[in-house]
Amino acid sequence: MASTNFRPLHDRVVVRRVESEEKTKGGIIIPDTAKEKPQEGEIVAVGSGARDESGKIVALDVKVGDRVLFGKWSGTEVKLNGEDLLIMKEADIMGIIG
Amino acid sequence: MASTNFRPLHDRVVVRRVESEEKTKGGIIIPDTAKEKPQEGEIVAVGSGARDESGKIVALDVKVGDRVLFGKWSGTEVKLNGEDLLIMKEADIMGIIG
Amino acid sequence: MASTNFRPLHDRVVVRRVESEEKTKGGIIIPDTAKEKPQEGEIVAVGSGARDESGKIVALDVKVGDRVLFGKWSGTEVKLNGEDLLIMKEADIMGIIG
Amino acid sequence: MASTNFRPLHDRVVVRRVESEEKTKGGIIIPDTAKEKPQEGEIVAVGSGARDESGKIVALDVKVGDRVLFGKWSGTEVKLNGEDLLIMKEADIMGIIG
Amino acid sequence: MASTNFRPLHDRVVVRRVESEEKTKGGIIIPDTAKEKPQEGEIVAVGSGARDESGKIVALDVKVGDRVLFGKWSGTEVKLNGEDLLIMKEADIMGIIG
Amino acid sequence: MASTNFRPLHDRVVVRRVESEEKTKGGIIIPDTAKEKPQEGEIVAVGSGARDESGKIVALDVKVGDRVLFGKWSGTEVKLNGEDLLIMKEADIMGIIG
Amino acid sequence: MASTNFRPLHDRVVVRRVESEEKTKGGIIIPDTAKEKPQEGEIVAVGSGARDESGKIVALDVKVGDRVLFGKWSGTEVKLNGEDLLIMKEADIMGIIG
């Protein structure tokens, strides 16, 4: 819940995995038996965006607090403020729930 | 039939597979014995579109309700609202039926 | 001969293979003994075209009714209205006969 | 010598291989013992050109009648009007003789 | 602490690894038992930036003094002024701490 | 010395290898014992240039008569007017001597 | 010290390796026991620059006389004026010392 003091660069985001017991909230259920299924998480930090070809920064489409689905193997694990989080690129986010 | 509360990012779409018994409707038959044949489905959610090189968002060509053909192995399976659906990119959609 | 109610997306086309007995018509003969030789077909549906870098849709160069040559292994087989057809990209079409 | 009724798409050309006995004409000799050496041919049909990034069609640099060198393994063999010809992209043409 | 007299070219940066005993400062802890986890470091020199497609130089987002996370295997080791440092591209930097 | 009646397409050039006995002229010596060392040659024909992204033809930087260095394995061997020559792209030319 | 009469094409540079005994000058030491460590050298010739997408030539950032670091395996060895030198692309240069 506490925001982390880490600012991802460019088109990267920081995601907190949502544990299985929370997954039934809102009726969204993702089976955790199958491999390669997408996983649910919450965006806790977003980069300022990547530059397009003309050099202009394009803001990301996800924002802090968004519930998202992402590929099971996406991102790099990192511990920030004692919490296990994931750093990934926005392109690894499949969509927003809710 | 119920719309799902999932918003795919960028050029992704959510597709509901059409079961075999529905396939003969409208005279469209896709043999399910052959491997790698395209499959039929219905678009249930579409992203807001990908950005072109100048940074402008280009809306997708498919819309919710479209009957589409897609590659047998396209997309990622996900369960939303208790329903098995597929998330894929519009580029995986071969065309629209009807 | 009947048009199919399938609209290919973007730069895809639907092609009906021309059977061997029709191939001698017009003096065009493609030996079917050699592997990887191009095959003859007829365009039965065309997409609205791909977008160029500026986001403008570029119409395809082939149109419905065109007799074309395409690579033996190009395209995806599909049965539409009970007929075996091929969905491929215009880039797989080598040229137009006639 | 007779023109073929085949129109190559985009940046493709149709090439008639020049047989070895003709190769000494004009003092140009290409040894046919070595593998991967370029081969000599005559352009018999040219596409209308590929589109550049702005969507404008750029005409090809070779024209019908040009004597050209091309890679030994370039192109796809096809029989048009009973004649064995090659369909290849202009990029496979190394240059023009004469 | 002493600045190094090395100017990285384009979009490269020079990074000083932060030793494990410093890592708990500020509450940021990165487990060093797991392989492939990102590592913490401090930017000691930055290039003037890469050119975008129009030839304009785009300044880097990181600056000297920034605490950053980077991939465990990123960069090239080099000894400058007797100190072990890393030269890497800004794209290898995941984000800024603090 | 005689110019060849071959016009390379686009960004290709025709190069005449300089034999070892000529290599010491001007004090330039390239050891021929080592493999993968660049070789010396003379430009005998140049293409009109490749097109840039806007479709404009960009003339080549080398001209007929230039002494150049090129990779030992660059280019395609061809016999033109009874002479062994090489056809390669300008990008394979490392630089100009003299 | 003597300039070489070789003009590298486009974005290539000619580099003279700095021998180990010179490396301690200025306090810069690069261990030569480790493999894949960058090496020190001096720029002795630079190309006129590569063209950007609009066809404009972009001058290189390094100039003759610059002390540079480059990858151990970068470049092609060549002997010019009896001296062993390296031809490489500017992108292989990590940065400038001093």
Image (spheres, coloured by chain):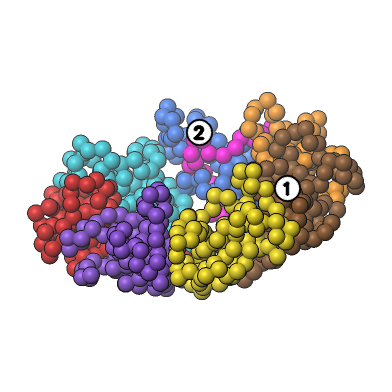
Chain colours: A purple, B yellow, C brown, D orange, E red, F blue, G cyan
User: Residue D7: percent from the left, percent from the top?
Assistant: 79, 53
> Residue farthest to the left?
E21
Figure quadrant of residue D23: top right
Mark 2 Cα shell of 10 Å, populated few (<14), some (14-19), many (≥20): few
| Left or right: B73 in relation to G60 | right
How far across and how far down the image is residue F79, in percent?
66, 34
Q: Which quadrant holds the N terminus of chain D?
A: top right
Q: Is residue B51 visible?
A: no
Element type at mark 1: strand
Three-letter amino acid code of the residue under disc 1: Phe
In which image quadrant can residue E93 be found?
bottom left
**Residue E18 or D92: which is nearer the viewer?**
E18
Judged by its main secondary structure, the magenta piece is loop
Query: Quadrant where the C terminus of chain D lies?
Result: top right
What span is colored magenta in the figure? F53-82
Amino acid type, label 2: Glu
Residue to which mark 1 is pinned:
C70
Q: Position of residue F41 (x, y in %)?
A: 53, 39
Residue F71 is covered by the magenta coloring: yes
Q: Are marks 1 and 2 on the same chain?
A: no
Can you identify the residue that label 2 sits on? Answer: F22
Q: Is residue D27 left or right of residue A22?
A: right
Residue at (86% x, 48% y) in the render: D3
